[in-house]
Image: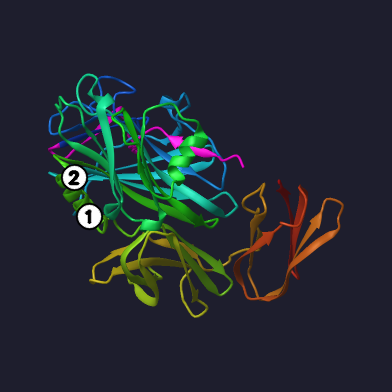
Amino acid sequence: MKKTFYILISLVFSVSLFAQTELVHNTGNLLCSIDDEGVVGNTKQVSYTGFQYNNTANTVFFGGLCYSINDSVMGECPSYNLDDFDVYEGLTDFYSDVTFNQISEFTMNHGDQLIYVNTFSKNNEPIVYYRLEFPNETGEDWTDFYAGMIVDFDIGAGSNYNNNMGGYDTARNLIYNYDASTTIDNPNYYGIALLNSSANSVNGYSVKNYTPTPEQIFTYFTNSDFTVDPILEDQRVFISSGPHAVLNGQSITLDFALVCGTDLNNLKSNTDVAISHEAALPVELTSFTAALNGNKVDLNWATATELNNYGFEIERSVDNTDWQKIGFAKGKGTSAQAQSYSFSDKIDALNGNNISYRLKQVDFNGEFAYSDVVNIASVATSYELTQNYPNPFNPATTISYSIVEKSNVKIEVFNSVGQRISTLVNEVKDAGKYSLNFDASNLSSGIYFYTISTPNFTATKKMTLLK
């Protein structure tokens, strides 16, 4: 079966409102360039800092992010005579938190697929961290997902890069390169570690430099063990995690670290530091929504990863000032997989036209952080049938409506010749705002109409199913 494989030519990307040409992670002993198209090393411009450890010359010719979804294959990497991904949003300045001195964010895309990346570094540590998030908004489950990184290290002056050697450490999920020539001028070791996957989902390869086909690259990323070409050569290293199942509407997040050391033992020691800091990467809330559903509000939220997460306290306010705890959802502790949560709040006894909600995420050690606030209007002031979203759609869409008094509500779907296809609602409803899901998996592409009928209100809207 032909496989589709995506390669994003960069080690680092950053997203921002204020675009600029280049940023440099500077830890004091490590410099790592980030440019506005995500290139690290000197493949783009020789004036770039590249990747320099302990005052050595640049040691990365290029680096990149790779992923594969459900056995489809394609590649994007200049070194393989392929194209770059698109920059969805550009670079911004670094910011900091209590653990990391420099943090950057960016978003890339390949077609409709978005890739969110955070990069982190800390003073006096020769490490740059990469958090990669892949949201699945394709309408289909991913059953065979892989993601990882590729780096072409060129270690040593002159032609010494042709005498590089690879190695691996399975205990640390680490793959690395070093100069093994007889005239070593750069004794440092350079590697990539996968920080948050179990051993049975880590794949590593160090291979001599050549121009492989996308199918060959896919083999490196789906290799079930760590493998090294045992020859002195210009080597490239691959490391990935998979296979993973990612349901539609969820996302997967993986954490990597580019690590340096003065020798092999120091490289391993620094990798241990990276592993310990991985716990400082926060619980990542990827979505938090509130939807009025009659006399209750349905809250839904999702996380990309969780670390030391005891759970979520759900808080509500009718004035956006005084907050009341109304429930608790137990967290998943530490998890590298996307997680989903839901909570319903009955509001028929509340006073006020607007209600606000927030989450208080609590760690096992008692530390906590608040989410952004979501607001919702609790009272329907007029009858309304809104346009379905998305539209066009495939295969499901959401239909929302409002009624101002308790009454019988009927919502039906018709095809283009007036035949009734489905009755979605036919019951007495309290005054309020409602949303429902219409699944057209068994219907063919075309124009359809949906209607609402109450004793005091009727309306019709058109929607388009495209398969």
- The secondary structure type at the circle numbered 2 is helix
Identify the residue at the far front of this view.
230
Amino acid, disc 2: Leu
Q: Residues within 10 Å of mark 2 (few under 14, many from 20)?
A: many
Q: Main secondary structure of the magenta part?
A: loop
Residue 277's disc is 1
Of the numbered discs 1 and 2, the one sitting upstream in the chain is: 2
Bounds of the magenta segment: 1-29
Q: Is residue 463 above or below residue 12?
A: below
Left or right of 75: which side holds 373? left
Q: Residues within 10 Å of mark 1 (few under 14, many from 20)?
A: some
Left or right of 304: which side holds 454? right
Amino acid, disc 1: His
Residue 172's disc is none
**Are circles 1 and 2 on residues that touch, CB within 8 Å?**
no
Question: Closer to the camera: disc 1 or disc 2?
Answer: 2
Q: Quadrant of the N terminus?
A: top right
Visible residue check, residue 371: no
- For label 2, the residue is 267
**Point 15% across, 41% down: residue:** 263
**Point 57% across, 42% down: residue:** 72
Using the image as rendered, state which of residue 441 and residue 226 is in the foreground.
Answer: 226
Q: Is residue 433 magenta?
A: no
